[in-house]
Image: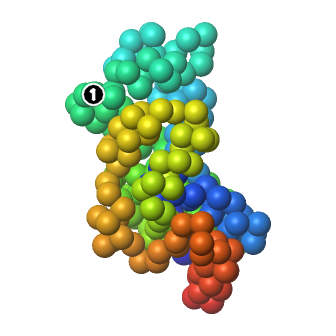
Amino acid sequence: MKVIGITGGIGSGKTTTCEIFQELGVPVYYADLRARELMTSNAELKSKIIQSFGSQAYDGGRLNRPYLAQQVFNSEEKLSVLNGLVHPAVANDFENWLEEQKEEKYVLKEAAILFESGAYQDVDITVLVIAPESLRLERVMERDGSSKEDVLKRMKNQWTQERKVKLADHIITNDGTQLLIPQVLELHHRFSDK
């Protein structure tokens, strides 16, 4: 079974792309979503986060995301600590999930920072979803109700699209003019034949 890593900058449309693969019957592991779930459901991880960031990291048993974001936003050291706690838990969770997918020809692992985290080295093939920055900005502002400044700050925390393109095995262009489904179908046939 092949593991395909799929990523893209914020607002590129990687989730929409993954949903098309899912419609084709391909299992998708959403690493960022699972990370958020594990930060609440995994007792060991929760305990480590509280040890590192204090009891304010949780509010009534639920993850206090605004507090945690404030803690790590301008501190690479604190972000590194948080990633050092969360990434191993997600990696373990992914391995368990993978065990359940043994019969599949291939699976997708969706991760926003696939390249930045180095996780791209643990997958067989990488797919990058790209879109012009102006369109990505517009999509995220509309989707999240965020200000332009906030979205630009979030974009700054990710590698540039150009840097990711150099590492990607396949590119899907989601610029509003090229159809997504034919691009996904082409890759699906390639991945299914191998």
Tell me the quarter of the picture where residue 101 sits.
bottom right
- Residue 42 is situated, as x and y percent measured from the top left of the image, at 56, 30
- Residue 123 is situated, as x and y percent measured from the top left of the image, at 44, 67
Please name the amino acid that badge 1 sits on: Asn
192 or 147: nearer the eye?
A: 147
13 lies above or below 38: below
150 or 71: nearer the eye?
A: 150
Most extreme residue toward the bottom is 193
Q: Residue at x 61, y 55 (%)?
A: 15
Q: Residues within 10 Å of mark 1 (few under 14, many from 20)?
A: few
Tell me the quarter of the picture where residue 189 sits.
bottom right
What is the basis of the colouring in this image? rainbow
- Residue 156 is situated, as x and y percent measured from the top left of the image, at 32, 44
Judged left or right of residue 177, residue 65 is left
Q: Residue at x 64, y 72 (%)?
A: 180
13 lies above or below 90: below
Q: Which residue is mark 1?
A: 74
- Residue 113 is situated, as x and y percent measured from the top left of the image, at 40, 52
> How many marks overall?
1
Residue 33 in view, yes or no: yes
Dot 1: element: loop
Q: Residue at x 36, y 70 (%)?
A: 165
Judged left or right of residue 125, residue 17 is right
21 lies above or below 81: below
Q: Quadrant of the C terminus?
A: bottom right
Residue 111 in view, yes or no: no
59 lies above or below 136: above
Q: Residue at x 33, y 29 (%)?
A: 73
Judged left or right of residue 73, residue 57 is right
